[in-house]
């Protein structure tokens, strides 16, 4: 359904039905680095937390372009991201070279 006056689509998923009138929906994209890592390993290695009494979940260690490192649950990560192909990577490198030479 359209949100009156905004031209924005409001999906029917429960998480989006509580959008406040002043909120808009956004979509973005970024290239990140990801490696499979369970949550307890991430917390122990990168956050130096004691995880001895904690159950773990499967997921990914995520490194963003600005260097920020976080952890994402497996389903969340795999829904939001897909692996870049070699051809896509070569194209991105070519675009980056073009931008830097202009």
Image (cartoon, rainbow, N blue to C red):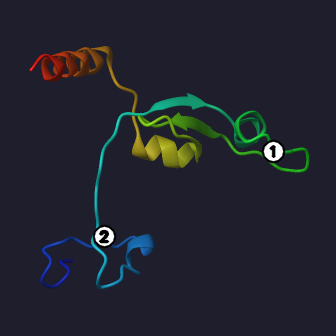
- Mark 1, Cα crowd under 10 Å, few <14 / some 14-19 / many 20+, is few
User: Which residue is pictured at 13% across the width and 16% down the height?
Assistant: 101
Quarter of the image with the N terminus in it? bottom left
Q: Is residue 18 above or below residue 77?
A: below
x, y percentage for residue 94? 19, 15
Quarter of the image with the C terminus in it? top left
**N-terminal of the two: label 2 or label 1?**
2
- Mark 2, Cα crowd under 10 Å, few <14 / some 14-19 / many 20+, is few
Q: Nearer the viewer, residue 24 or 11?
A: 24
Mark 2 and mark 1 in contact? Answer it, CB < 8 Å: no
User: Which residue is pictured at 51% across the width and 49% down the height?
Assistant: 76
x, y percentage for residue 52? 90, 44
**Relative side of 41 to 66, left or right:** right
Q: Residue furthest left?
A: 102
x, y percentage for residue 13? 39, 70
User: How far is mark 2 from mark 1, CA to CA?
Assistant: 38 Å
Tell me where residue 85 sits by quadrant.
Answer: top left
Q: Is residue 8 above or below residue 38?
A: below
Tell me where residue 82 sits by quadrant.
Answer: top left
Tell me where residue 32 sits by quadrant.
Answer: top left
User: Which residue is pictured at 35% across the width and 83% down the height?
Assistant: 20
x, y percentage for residue 99? 15, 23
Which disc is residue 38 wearing? none
Q: Is residue 1 above or below residue 77?
A: below
Q: Nearer the viewer, residue 1 or 72?
A: 72
How many discs mark residues in the rendered view?
A: 2
User: Which residue is pictured at 75% across the width and 35% down the height?
Assistant: 41
Question: Is label 2 in a helix, a strand or a loop?
Answer: loop
Q: Nearer the viewer, mark 2 or mark 1?
A: 1
The residue singled out by tag 2 in the image is: 11
Question: Is label 1 in a helix, a strand or a loop?
Answer: loop
Which disc is residue 49 wearing? 1
């Amino acid at each position: 359904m359209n949100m009156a006056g905004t031209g924005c689509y409001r999906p029917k998923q429960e998480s989006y039905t509580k959008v406040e009138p002043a909120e808009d929906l956004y979509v973005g994209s970024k290239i990140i680095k990801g490696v499979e890592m369970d949550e307890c390993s991430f917390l122990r290695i990168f956050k130096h937390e004691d995880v001895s009494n904690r159950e773990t979940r499967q997921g990914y260690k995520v490194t963003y372009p600005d260097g920020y490192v976080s952890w994402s649950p497996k389903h969340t990560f795999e829904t939001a991201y897909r692996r870049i192909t070699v051809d896509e990577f070569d194209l991105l490198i070519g675009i980056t070279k073009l931008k830097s030479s202009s």
